[in-house]
Image (cartoon, grey):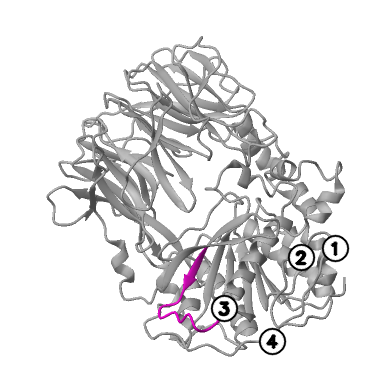
Amino acid sequence: MIPEPMGSHRPSPAPSFPGLVLLTLLALAPLPAALDAQTPEFRDVISLRGVGSPVISPDGYAVAYTVRTADWEANEFRSEIWLWREGATEPVQLTRTAGGSSQSPAWSPDGRWLAFLSDRGQGTQVHVLSMAGGEAMAVTGVEGGVGRFVWSPDGARLAIARTEPESPESKAREKLYGRWAAEDQEYRMTHVWMVDFDPAAFSPLEPSRVTGDPDPEAYTVGSFEWSPDGTEMAFDHRPDPLINSGVHTNISVVAVATGEVRPLVTLPSSQSGPRWSPDGRWVMFSASHPDTTRHYFLNNELARVPAAGGGGEPEVLTSSFDEMVSPVAWLPQGIVFTAWQGVRRRPFLLDPASGRIQELPAGPTSVWSLSFSAHGRTVAMLAEDPTSLQEIHRADTRSWRGERLTDMTAQVADWPLGTSEVVTWTSQDGTTIEGVLRKPAGYDSSRAYPLLVDIHGGPTAISRPSLLSGYVYPHLQWLSRGALVLEPNYRGSAGFGEAFRSLNVRNLGVGDAWDVLSGVEALIDRGMAHPDSLGAMGWSQGGYISAFLTTTSDWFRAISVGAGISDWVTYYVNTDIHPFTRQYLRATPWEDPEIYATTSPMTYVTQATTPTLIQHGEFDRRVPIPNAYKLYQGLQDVGVPVELVVFRGFGHGINKPKEQLAAMWQNWQWFARWIWGEEVELPLDVEGEVDHQAPGR
């Protein structure tokens, strides 16, 4: 549709769909100030160390956790295990894994040993360290490695998740006929095995299978947990490990001594993550909505059943709580879970007897993982405030007051970080939308700034106020250069309840664009954003919304589409999660081709005008690369400036340091060209010399 002439130099209200109205492309804004001399280089940002996986000792006086670092020579992110002890002057590094990582620490019930997973040689195996000192020793040495492990309550055994090795038949077939597979028909099951823990043994012990009766091929096992007395294990399982079989997950209990399995929860929807009550009478689990055609955007529930079985329908415990929940632990005080509340990730305590739910007064704004001491009196947390990086904290659960054990934030103490705050606006249909607005240090309210919009994925993810953000988008450098960054929590985002998450059902892209464009307009109306210097970007679902904006508006000077969907039919027949599209669009493309067309960026490609960078992983199964090629060819055909970058060997995410650096540089170059009118060359190391004229190495 040909746009109407505009009488003002700012965007009009967001367009309705279908019947799109394109807007006049605006002139380039004046160049902002140069980068602050203290602005870190891209490599510095990627190299920041980060903490995770805190586990507190049974007595509450020590906390083990992981620290992730970038190994630039190996082009890998590595993790090692560190230990904080009460009374020690500072934490100490426990593991040093040559050519690999150590992760998933877990204390023995008596606190004398720390077990962990490490890829030191024969795949990922369970290792242990004595807290009295000494070298780590391997507990397992199974073919294919170990995926997960759990200590028995008496500390004498470990249950491990082991995926079955490749069969002799499969090896023989490959030798004769090469590598091929029938789609959805070839996979290997995972089962629970047992290994005795013998501190006197200095070689890995042979495990024995636990779950396999009556039919070892009847299911594959996910998570599992010992009963308090150690005689049984509850575990979730599904018919096969195919990603779309998760909706058929059920829960059973196995008698450890005999291997006898009895079903516990067998409902049509998914039940997973079993947790025993401290007295062993109940098993709690996470249950998806009984309507298995909408579980991508409806609330899950916490429910319980008698551990002995025969209790009828499960008792739902969180029906009054309007958000997705993540169970953490069942303590004597009650059930602890976490959930988003707006842009804050908070812990909650549920009394299963009364159904009462209370938010726990944990000090930090957002809490991701919690680990409790033996009696639940002390907790270790991975947590964050808007003015800190993620840190490890310890607190007394009677007051939830405690101390921060790490200081990762010191790494950025001298960086010009700017500020982040929550802003709200009204979308085209009257819906209230929140977003995170990042402002540069020294922000001046009397002037309008270039605005770069970074749209999160999911769609049930969320953007939050934090000290740093960006992934492959150089937020920090843009802020230092003198720009605003807006991260909208568009309809479908977590944290605002089930009804809000459902607002983009049969409205994908369309309603999302309303939310993004109305947020941009609000900042222009407030005199904060310059209407002539607008850019947008996003990865995955954020890449899809960016692609939709590319073909349905000309508000932006430039757009970057990361692993984005360009056509829902193309996506539907290629992705590894076909139900996602059926659930959000409420039909297959053969049943309702119109809704697939209305919500697809390619439908409107002949109206596109915005210069677009496309970044995509070569082997992306979640958003397969035909989406990128289709948008690339379509934009070329209509004469829109476009570049496609394919990350060879990568899937849906860019998870190696060097390629993250490359992706960040590409986005810096693209927006420098189209927002600031600059041509930036990728710095190269030629004969040992590196160009340091821009923020990178």
Disc nearest the viewer among 2 and 4? 2
Amino acid type of the residue that numbered disc 1 sits on in the rendered structure = Gly
Label disc, if present, on residue 27 of the rendered structure: 4
**Disc 3 secondary structure class:** loop
Residue bearing the label numbered 1: 19
Q: Are marks 2 and 1 in contact (CB under 8 Å)?
A: yes
Residue bearing the label numbered 2: 15
Q: Which of marks 3 and 2 is nearer the N terminus?
A: 2
Residue 178 location, quadrant = top right
**Disc 4 secondary structure class:** loop
Disc nearest the viewer among 3 and 2? 3
Q: In which quarter of the image is the N terminus?
A: bottom right
Q: Residue furthest left?
A: 87
Q: Which of marks 3 and 4 is nearer the N terminus?
A: 4
Q: Are marks 4 and 1 in contact (CB under 8 Å)?
A: no
Label disc, if present, on residue 577 of the rendered structure: none
Query: Can residue 569 be seen from the camera position used here?
Result: yes
Q: Position of residue 348 (x, y in %)?
A: 39, 38
Q: Quadrant of the C terminus?
A: bottom left
Q: Earlier in the sequence, mark 1 or mark 3?
A: 1
Q: In this view, does 335 lie to the left or right of 528?
A: left
Amino acid type of the residue that numbered disc 3 sits on in the rendered structure = Gly
Q: Residue furthest top?
A: 310
CA separation, marks 2 and 1? 8 Å
**Disc 2 secondary structure class:** loop
